[in-house]
Structures are given as C-alpha cells and as structure tokens.
Amino acid sequence: MDTFQAGAHDNRAALLALESAAAATRAGFACCFSSAAEYEQALITARRAEGRYRKTGALPRLLLACGAALVVLAGLWSLVTR
C-alpha cells in the first residue's frame, strides 16, 4: 500500500511540474503589447526613429495645388469656349 501512495505522490508532483512548465511556456509566448493599437503605436514610433516617415516640404503641396488649379481652370475654359 505504501508503494501505491508513493507512486500517487510522484504522479501528483510530476503533474504539478508539468503544469508549471506549461504555464511558463505560455508566458514566454505572451505578447508584450496589450492591444493592437498599442503595438501599432510602438511600431510607428520605432519607424519614425529610423527616419522612415519624413515630413514633406511645402513644395510638393504647392505643386499639387497648382496642378489641381490648372485642371479646374482647363475644365472651366472648356465650358466657356463651347
């Protein structure tokens, strides 16, 4: 009878060790971010630090505005000259 109880104790200890190892493994795979928004914010911050997102100057915006104005003027001109 003592052998059976010793075996049961060993099984219980092995089961507890297995459960603690599984919990440690799950914790190792856990993500350090609590949400996708937090992850994206960290990713953008890291990319900005690398210089990936540079601010564009005023010239590209000015050229775009001039191009749009030319398109509008060409459309108006075509309506007027009919």
Image (cartoon, rainbow, N blue to C red):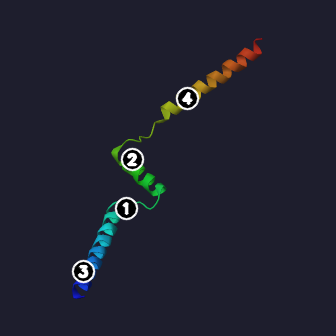
The residue indicated by pointer 1 is: 30
Residues at marks 4 and 1, CA–CA distance in whole angstroms: 46 Å
Spatial CA distance of label 1 from label 2 is 26 Å
Q: CA distance from mark 2 to mark 4?
A: 25 Å
The amino acid pointed to by label 4 is: Leu
Sequence-first disc among 3 and 4: 3
Mark 1 burial class by Cα count in 10 Å: few <14, some 14-19, many 20+: few
Q: Nearer the viewer, mark 2 or mark 4?
A: 2
Circle 3: element type? helix
Question: Mark 2 and mark 1 in contact (Cβ < 8 Å)?
Answer: no
Identify the residue under disc 3: 7
Position of residue 76 measured from the top left corner of the image (x, y, whole percent): 72, 20
Q: Secondary structure at mark 1?
A: loop
Q: Which mark is residue 78?
A: none
Q: Nearer the viewer, mark 4 or mark 1?
A: 1
Q: Is residue 45 above or below residue 59?
A: below
Q: CA distance from mark 1 to mark 3?
A: 35 Å
Question: Residue 17 location, x and y as percent?
Answer: 27, 73
Q: Quadrant of residue 70?
A: top right
Comes first in the chain, label 1 or label 2: 1
Residue in view at x 39 percent, y 47 percent? 48
Residue position marked by numbered label 2 in the rendering: 48
Quadrant for the C terminus in the image = top right
Q: Whole-Å distance between the Cαs marked 3 and 4?
A: 80 Å
Q: Which residue is mark 4?
A: 64
Say what amino acid the circle numbered 3 marks: Gly
Q: Residues within 10 Å of mark 3 (few under 14, many from 20)?
A: few
